[in-house]
Image (tube, helix red, strand yellow):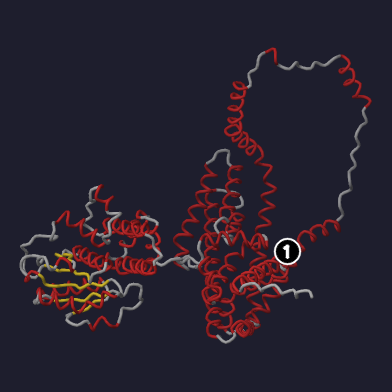
Amino acid sequence: MDQPVSAPDPLPLPNRERALGIIATATLLALLYFGRDVLVPITLAVILSLLIAPLVRVLRRIGFGHILSVLAAVLVLGFSFAAVAGVIGSQLVHMAQSLPRYQQTIEYKLKTLNDVTVGKFNELTGQAGRFTNRRPAATRQPVALETPRTLQQSASAGPNSPIPVELHQPPPNPVQVIERVLGSIWVPIETAGIVLVVLVFVLLEHETLRDRFIRIAGGADIRLTTLAINDAGERLSRFFVSQFAVNLGLGVAVWIGLSLIGLPQPLLWAALAAVLRFVPYVGVWIAALCATLLAAAVDPGWMLALTTLGLFALVELIAGQLVEPQLYGHTTGLSPLSVVVAAIFWSWLWGPIGLIVSTPLTLCLLVAGRHIKALSLLDVLLGDTQALTMPERFYQRALSADSAELIASAREFLKRKSFAAYCDLVLIPALHLAGIDLLAGTISADQQAKLRNTMVAVIAAIGGESRRPPRRYRQSSVLDSSGVGRELRRQREQVSGRWQGPLVVPPGSVMICVGLGSKADEFAAELLVRILREQKMDARHLSLDDLPDAPPPNAADAVSIIYVVSAFPSEERGRSEATTEEMRRRFPHACIVAVFLPGMLLQPEPAIDSVRGADKSASSLGHAVQICLDMHRKPTEP
């Protein structure tokens, strides 16, 4: 008997989900492309509803009814667009009529540009051709001479050749002219009519549409859907109203400026600049280029063209860098690259209309990515927030041995906050990330060496007392097994000696930082020493191995504070009580502070306050420094 044919194994679940995602994406793109005749008017209507929604609310607050407020707002919007279109059209007609007057200037400018650019190039290529294409006279091709026969043929061809006849069509009648005009403007009029009708109904049923969308998309989590819709609506409405106000102000400024410098049709270029500025990044410069070309055609010199271009640059600089940050702070939430890519994508799908609406549509996708977990990838790809946290970014750059970038970013951070804050927020969490990978065995020896040397370079550059060690010593430190804390301590000992300072000091003037034994603890203790020294405190770093040899400075009375430091939760914290007791026995008059840092945890550990034998506790390096400052400030207070 024949063996039964077994059914093929189904696709694994991840592959099936990936295939379904690709199919869904392709289907969505096809719907957006082939359904653009329906989707574009609806999208424009929704966006315009967000633009005039504040006007509708103002009219309702004044006392107009809901329907009357919507109709009045739509009429105002329609008349505004008609007025702008009329101004642009009339100005274009006037400019077209005046262009023949500038023909001589245009021809002179084109000839000058041709002589400076193409003419020079042709002259250079001609000179090069004469040098490279020299051949002996014997090899040159003979020049064809006209024989009497050919002259006779050319002469006889004239009288006997037929005379071409040109047929002139009669001028079109008024009906044909009207048909041509309506045929050219019918599509924009049809689209505008559909947009206005949809806009009216969207405004009339605004609350109903919102409730229906929440019902469909919200499911069981109505709260999250409501939050997403409110966020998208407020963000888009604020963005559109603010951008409309900025563009209107920019158009008025351009109109006044061009009128003062004497450029013809200043209202045309002001209106174009205000409208085209809705196109991200390049819109206003398209208007500036057109106005500059007209200025070059009008003026025999180049001063008017340069002044026009400078006016556009000045107005755009003021609007983009001073006015917009005050209104909405550039906070569309989109990264600049995502805005450019979105403009290319939506213009490919929907043409010029897609270019104009690309920013609000992409902003809707960003809001959806921030509030819907399944779409969180959109927030990462489109948002302007950092994809990596500061500790993750430090750890990634340190694994790549990119110390120069880390030093530059650290110096930018230190312009705003303290070195202690940088250690608490960046260095210690990054060290904890490295410790996690080290325990998991996912970080190689070479990466450990890169991480160690990069952290040494960064701390030596920004942490003070950074005299560069000899080159031979720095190269050998790549292969040794000492941690970053020991390496940084060695650098300081080369400057200040084994005990990192003088042995004879005033009583109570020395602070000792002791790690609990791990390399991370030694690094955290060294960071605390450098932070305290930045505050003009005599802080010194000792390890547990240093204690049996000899006490630090001669008298125990010189030590006022002992910090027992732990970088992040680890097994070394189990010896904290024994270490604290040993410190108490050696320095009975010193204040012992347990500094247990949380590492990557958002909140400090609750067990910090229960360290036996410690007088005080701190959950950050900044808190530990503040304890020292408070203790040394008390004797001077009245």
- Foreground: 583 or 63? 583
Is 519 on the left or on the right of 46, as rendered? left
In the picture as drawn, the residue positioned furthest to the top comes out as: 138
The answer to whether residue 65 is seen in the rendering is no
Q: Which residue is mark 1?
A: 188
Q: Position of residue 510 (x, y in %)?
A: 12, 67
- Foreground: 490 or 157? 490
At x 53%, y 56%, the residue is 256
Is 129 on the left or on the right of 227, as rendered? right
Q: Position of residue 20 (x, y in %)?
A: 65, 72
- Foreground: 61 or 502? 502
Looking at the image, residue 123 lies above or below residue 282: above
At x 28%, y 58%, the residue is 456
- Residue 538: name its quadrant: bottom left
Looking at the image, residue 623 lies above or below residue 178: below
Q: Which element type, helix, strand or loop, lies under badge 1?
A: helix
Is 239 on the left or on the right of 608, as rendered? right
Is 351 on the left or on the right of 393, as rendered? right
